[in-house]
Structures are given as C-alpha cells and as structure tokens.
Amino acid sequence: MDKSTIVCRCEEITVEDIASAVSQGAETFDDVKRLTRCGMGLCQAKTCRIVISELIAEMKAKSAADISVPRLRMPLRPVPIGVLAANTASGSFVRSTLAEAEPDEGQEK
Amino acid sequence: METEVLILGGGPSGLAAAYEVASRGHGVMIVDEAWALGGQLRQQTQIIDPIPAPFTGLRGFQLAETLVERLKEFPVEYLLKHEFIGLFADGSAGVSGGEKILRISAKCFVVATGAAESARHFPGWTLPGVMTIGAAQILINRERIYPGKTGLVVGSSDMALEITRQMHDVGINVIGVVEPTSQILAKDGKIVSSLQETGIPVLLQTEVVAVSGSGKVETVLLSSGNKPGVETDCQVDFVCIDGGRHPILEPFSIMNCPLRYEKELGGWLPSYNGKLQSTNSGIFVAGQAAGVTCQAGVVLTGAIAGINAVDYLENGTAEARESCKQVYWDELKRIESTQTPEVWQARMSHMG
Amino acid sequence: MSREYETVIIGGGVIGSGIAYHLSESKSDGILVIDKNFPLSGSSGSTQAWVWVHTKTPSWYGEFSMYSSELYGYLHRKIGDIEFIRTGGICPFFSENEREHAKSLAESQAQVGIEIQVLDRDEVLAREPALSDKVLGATYSRIDGNVNPMRLVEQYMKAAKINGVTYEYYNKVTDIEKKQGSFLVTTEKGLFTCKNLVLSAGVWTHEVGKMLGLDIPVHPVRGQVMITEPLAPFMKYTLDGLRQASNGEVLIGYSREEAGFDRSTSLDFIGSTANFALALVPDLAKAKIVRSFSGLRVMPKDEFPILGPIPGIENLYIAAMHSGITLSPLAGTLISELITEGETSIPIERYSITRFA
C-alpha cells in the first residue's frame, strides 16, 4: 500500500506513521495508538481498528489473531457533558488539589 | 428503571431473543439506537433464504415486521433512539436518549449489537463518494437516495453481489465488481447467477490502486494481476467497498467479557459457551455479535440466547425449553453447515 | 548466555526512560531498559500530564517539584518537541474559607520561591473567562503547565536510543539476584547482568522489589480521566481538574480510587466528573465526551517520592513516585548523578527509602 495512504481518517494517520511506530518497537494497536494517536479520534477506532491491526500484523509478520484488541472505552458514543451530568448525583470523585494542599505550619514532615 | 432481561440491539437477533423471553412470561426491555426496530433487515429487499419455517418467503424488511409484530401481544418495553453508552459500577446499564443518562438494572443481558463493516484502504478512500457496500444499500432502500450514477464495487461477497444487483435494478450503472483474489467470494450460487444476468463483469485478481478526484470520486485506477504493470482508468462517481464484517466489540469490552479470535466468525468476538453465554455469566451473546453469519443464523442464535436467558433467570432449565433449544440448534446446524460449513465449524470450536 | 550491561533500568515509563536519557547524556553505552510491555502502557500514558507545582506541599516538596518544572524549559531543546507549554496554573475556589487557605498556601510556598498570586473574582475571570462566574477567586502561579505525555516518553526513548541505550520491550523481569558485585537479572527472554540496577517499574515496583527481598511501599491508586471531542481553543490555563490540550481536546478529572490494578472506568465517575466540569466551566455543557480512561498512580505509602540508593545493596537505585510527569527531568538528572558521580547536586536524603524502615 502507498505509504501516504491514510488509515485513521479521524486523526489523519498514514501507513507510514504506523510503520514508524512499529519500527520503534510497538507491537499492539494500543502501543501504536499511544505513539501516533490512531484510533483516538471521534470514532474511537470503530473505523480503523481492523485495518490497522492487520497492518501491524503484516509489518510484524504475525497473524491477525496475535494483535490484541485495543481497550475500548466508555462512553460508547460521544455524549455531551450536559447530558452526562443531568440525572447524576453531584457527589464528586474529584477533589481540588487546592483543598488537598497543606501549607506548612511549622511542623516539618 | 428495572427489567429482567435487557436486550441491547433491536435487530433480528434481539427481537428473536425478546420473543423467547417475553412469551415465557419474563420482563424484557429492548434498547436500540435507531428510531425503528429491525436493525439491518430494514433495508433488505431480497427474500431471505434460507430461513427457518415460520419465516419462509419473506423479504428482509417483511421479516423485520413479522419479528416485531409477534412481540405485540407481550408487555415488552422499548427504548428506541437510545444508545447504550456504558455501565455503572454496580453493573447497571447507562442508556442515553440525548437528554440524560437512564440507569437500567437488569438480571441479565442479551447483547445483540451486530456487526460492523470493515473498510478497505487505498489512496483516496477518504474521498466523498467512497462508501461501504452496506451504506450504499441503506441509501438506496431506506433513504431512497442514489449513491451515484456510475459506480464500482470492490469485493465479491454474497452481500456485495446482492447489493450490486439491487443497484442495477434501480438503474444505477455499476461498471464492474473487482475482486483482488482469483475467485468470486460469494458462496450462494443463486446470488452469483443473479448478478451474472445483469452482465456486470466481475474482474478477478484486480485491485484498486487509487481513487482520485477533486473533492469527490472521479476516477478509479485499477491494476490487474493478469497484466502486470498495466493500470486502467475508470470514470465513476462512487465506489462501494466490501471489506467484510466484524462483530462489534465495544459493549463486550466494557463488560469485561474475554475476547477470542475466530477468523471465520469475523475475527475477534466474545468468548461464549454452548449456552451462548459469556464468561461473564449474566451476559448472553446473539446474532452477528456471536459471529458473522447469515440471517437465519442471526435469528436462531437470538432465539437460543433468549431461552438461555430464561434458564438463567429461573436458575435451571425445563424440558420444554430444552427441546425448543434443540430444535433451534438443529436448524442452525442444518443451515450453517450447508451454507457456510466453515462458520459452523468455527462456532463449534469457539464454544469449545 | 547472559548479556552484560553497566546499568539496567527496570521499567521504561516516564521515570525509567527519563533516567535512561539523562544517564546516556554522560555515559554513552552500557545502558539497558527492560519493560514488561511497551512504554506508555502503564501510568505514563494515562494521565492529564500537568507539569504542576504550586499546590505541592509541604513547601520542600513544592520546591522539589519546582526544580523539575524549571528543567522542562530546556528539555525540548535536548530531546525534541514534547508539546510542553507553561500555561500557568489556576486553582479556582468557591467558598470564603478557601480564600484563607489559599493565602496561607501562597505564604508558605513563597518561602521556597514558588510565586502564587491569590486572585479575586474579577481577576480570575479576566484571566480565564471560561470559568464559572460563581467563582470567588483562585490561586494562580505562572510556573505550572502541561506536556504531551506520549511525546515526552517517545522523545526520551528516541534520544536515549540515539545515545546508545538499548530497550527490551515485552520482556518481563522474573528474578533478580546479586552475586559477586553483579546483578543477575532474569527475564522471560534471557539473562542480563549489570553493575548498576535501577528500579523504576512504577506501580509494579513493589513486585520487582520482592525479587530482591525488599518490601517497597508503593501501591496503585486509580485515576480516571475523561476527554472531549476537539474544541476550538477557549481555555488558556491549566485549571485544577481540567485542561485543554493543543489539539483542542479537554481532559477532565483526576479521581483517586483504591481499586488495586483494576483499570476500568465507570459511568458513576463519568457522571460525577461531568458535574464537576460544569461547575468549573459551564460552557462545556454541549461538548461531547468521546472517551474516558483510567491510569494507576504510583503511590508511595507517605505519598512522597522514593528516590535514591537503596542502602544495603550496593549500586541499587530506586525511583518510584506519583507526579512522574512533573518530576521526570529531575529524577532522571539525580539518578544519573548518583550513578556517575556518587552524589547529587541537591540533597535527596528526605526521599530515601530508609524513612520507611
């Protein structure tokens, strides 16, 4: 395949980009994803997972069964923050780092 | 919200599963992202064959209507135009209709989320006018929109040839079907001869070198294995890609269902046992999600998963249900092992 | 057959690769990094990647973070573009008690040279108009920023390899022994021997330590983050809890959960974090979340870095800490100073593993 062919259209990642990640030692879709951003765009690898996995397999001279499936993450569809927030308890998983900061008060740890 | 069996996907397998659960008096809810039930059957205009006895002679969309119709006497709950987006920590499902997240707790799930079409890549595949063969069918049969005037089909599966015929029938000029390998991949002789009647050539050992055009598809460049070094230009305004289909994995991935690779079932798919039950025990797998197969396989695996979900709810099976399952398995075996023996074998090996 | 190296580094994440790179600047060969997967598959690739200083307390820890942050200004010149931006950091507050807290933080951090301004409502809204108008004020420091963690680790690796460092990927260390002044490092793909051994295996440092009979008090603390679709640039600063990356995506949240090695995410987190995001930046309501991820923070028992030689076993070093993104240039510099010169340019006794004895 032509090196400049796009394989991940969301992030415009080419065959050559994949080859470069593989040449650095990446072996799985997730490895390649972290180096190139392939599959990180709006479709979350729904379009490119198969072809990129096949490409990695080919470059590594492995079979498609050896290329594990990337981690697929929630939400399974893009959802507006306002929709996610509606109807959800506002008890927070997130504490501010300011609240957690403990200014010195003479005592040294 | 609460239900006994939550079915993800209102296509043929989800509908078949719902029937088995609801007709045995259990609560069932179907979630589907579309506004109408029936899934991919809704744009199928051909007669579905083979198919188990009560459904013979129906066209795809009619089969969908029939599967929906027979649920009407039961109190099935529907959440249409709702997307399954994930799970809460307690295992309940999060579903969104665009305003908020509904939380649905269920005793078990039937995941019938189907398959997606795989793309094929060549320079220019991102140009407007390049689409999957399934997308072309939706345009023609569901939206009544022509994908273009003159097109080329890349790939020669049953599905590709069937849709090529449908394009021809509505007056679209398909200049050819190109197939990179040395043989037509379609297995159904009737579909192959139906295409041959149209005179549309199937170009074997032929590959797309590139698609080009300014802002849209204008030219396809083909190379033939028979004539190395010779590349042929074709003027078209659309290209359909048949890259095969693969089970949709996202729901299984977030439900922590282990996956396994079976080439003949469409690649990676959730592991399941002889009850079509994932290793994550409250999850049953049905339809194309359980392996890419024919429509009969989709309906039958849905029905089998549905009965197994009932067994799960009732903590054991009953003789009547067992014999019913046996009938469905026999049908599935008869159809898959004659139509697509490799699919049946892969399914058997997958179930271990 | 064993392969000999002068230094073996176990773990190629931001800390291990940072050490490999810094060490390779003064010792050009004999360095091997062993990673059980591929770098970025652990904590280093699952982070908001702030380079963050101003709320790091006590002040001696803030000072340590500040030194590392200052090194970022030079890092890209040495290893290439890592998309580091010193955006400045803002911690908004929504209650009056917090204003007092903010002031005492500013005073305390000033002792070590970390400049913090306590902004009033108008000042903070003038700086970052996207913030909720319910904000009462904020702490602000110009020193904070963020970096692209994928680029950072990739560039560390590339620069290290150019300097002669060897990497072993997908190779798990299964046993370590010390014999006659050499470490014998057994891996799935064979034996390596070395004079110096560095433990920088992140959340797996405890497991690696056991091979040497050590009980290294490090455990994983899960952090979930969610990410929006790319949005037109509208946020300038790194806010406490969210930031906009250079590609337009907004990264939100940083939960702290005791969940062992479980890296799943949940809608509970996503819903709660969505509420948090709206409280901070109401305009995000229409922004779509495209994914969430979770990472495992490398959490020493008292939450401060474990850094330096491990007494009792000669030539054995450890570098295990959370905030590894912020601290990697400094940790890399200090461990390579220890290995090449036997001493460090700033005192690090406070971070010695001996404090847990």
Image (cartoon, coloured by chain):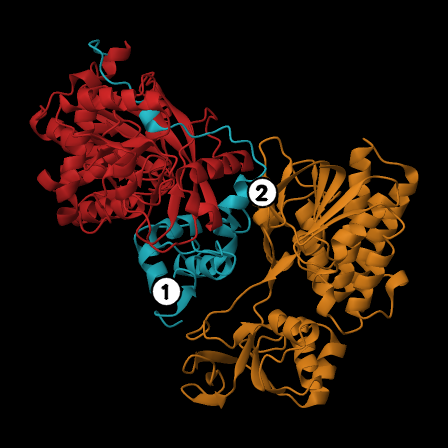
- Which residue is labeled 1 in the image? A14
Asked if C91 appears above or below A61 in the picture, the reply is above
| Chain C rendering hue | red
Residue B5 is at least partly visible in this image: yes
Q: Which chain is cyan in the rendering?
A: A
Q: Are marks 1 and 2 on the same chain?
A: no
Element on which disc 2 rests: strand
As rendered, which of B102 and B25 lies closer to the eye?
B102
**Amino acid at pointer 1:** Thr
The percent position of residue C15, horizontal first and vertical second, equals 25, 34
Residue drawn at x 58%, y 75% as measured from the top left: B155
| Chain B rendering hue | orange
> Residue B185 occupies which quadrant of the picture?
bottom right
The percent position of residue C83, horizontal first and vertical second, equals 24, 49
**Amino acid at pointer 2:** Gly
The percent position of residue C225, horizontal first and vertical second, equals 42, 39
Q: Are marks 1 and 2 in contact (CB under 8 Å)?
A: no
